[in-house]
Amino acid sequence: MEKIVYHGSHDGNIEMIKSHVGTHQKQCIYATDNMVIAMLFMNRGMGDLDTIKIYDNGLPILIERREGVLERIYNTSGYIYELDGSSFKHYDYLWEPEVISFESAIKPIKKTYYDNILMTLNEEAKSGNLKIYKYPNRPNYIPLDNSDLIDKYINFELIGIKGAIKSLLAIYPEFEHIVTEKLNKEQNKVK
C-alpha cells in the first residue's frame, strides 16, 4: 500500500493541492504523516503568532499564546486531505513531522470534513494523541510574554519573508522598541 500523508485546510473546495512558497522559501506542498498535526493547520489563524506547535517524541503539543485564541481559530469547521505520499520527503530544515513535495500540484485521494476542529482536538487530547496548553499555561522554556517570537520574526524578515515584522507588531506592539533595536544592530553588522 502506498504511504499516505495529510494536509489540513479550512477550505473544503480544493481539487488540487498546489505548491506555494512557505517560510522555508521553497516552492513546495507541505504535509505530514501525522493526522493530528494536519488538524492543527485547519484554521485561519496567524500561525506562530497565535499558537506554538511542538512535536515531542511523537506527541503533538499545541500551546495557546493569548487568551481565547484556540476558541477563535479552531471553533470552526475544517478539512483533512489525504495525499499519495510517494513524492513527499522529510528534509533536515523541516519541522520533525513535516514533509514536502516539490510537485507543482497534487490531487487529493480523499477529503474528510470536521464540523468543529476544537472539539476534535479536545477529543484527540483526551485520547492521549495531543497535549493542549490553554493560556496562560505553557512549558517553562516558553516565555509567557511571547518574546520568543522576536528573533524568529526578525529572521523571517531578514531571509526575505516581507511583512513578517509588520505581522508581529500588529499583534504584539509592545515589541516595537526591541525589534527596532535588534534590526538596527543587524543592519550595522552588514555595513
Image: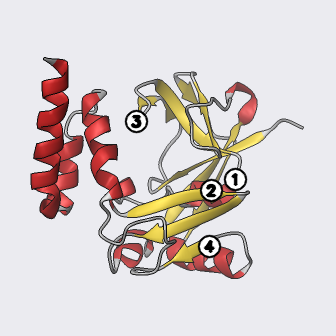
Q: Give the quadrant of the C terminus.
A: top left
Q: Secondary structure at mark 3?
A: loop
Name the residue tied to disc 3: 23
* Local secondary structure at mark 4: strand
Front disc: 3 or 1: 3
Q: Along the line of sight, which residue is nearer the eye, 125 or 75?
A: 125
Of the residues under marks 4 and 2, which one precedes in the sequence? 2
- Residue at position x 75%, y 28% in the image: 86
The percent coordinates of residue 11 (x first, y second) are 44, 53
Residue picked out by circle 4? 131
Q: Which residue is mark 2?
A: 55
* Quadrant, the N terminus: top right
Q: Quadrant of residue 147?
A: bottom left
Q: Residues within 10 Å of mark 3 (few under 14, many from 20)?
A: few
**Which mark sits nearer the N-terminus, 4 or 3?**
3
Q: CA distance from mark 4 to mark 3?
A: 25 Å
The image quarter containing residue 155 is: top left
Q: How far apart, in angstroms, are the residues tagged by discs 4 and 1?
A: 14 Å
Q: Are marks 2 and 1 in contact (CB under 8 Å)?
A: yes
- Three-letter amino acid code at the position of disc 4: Lys
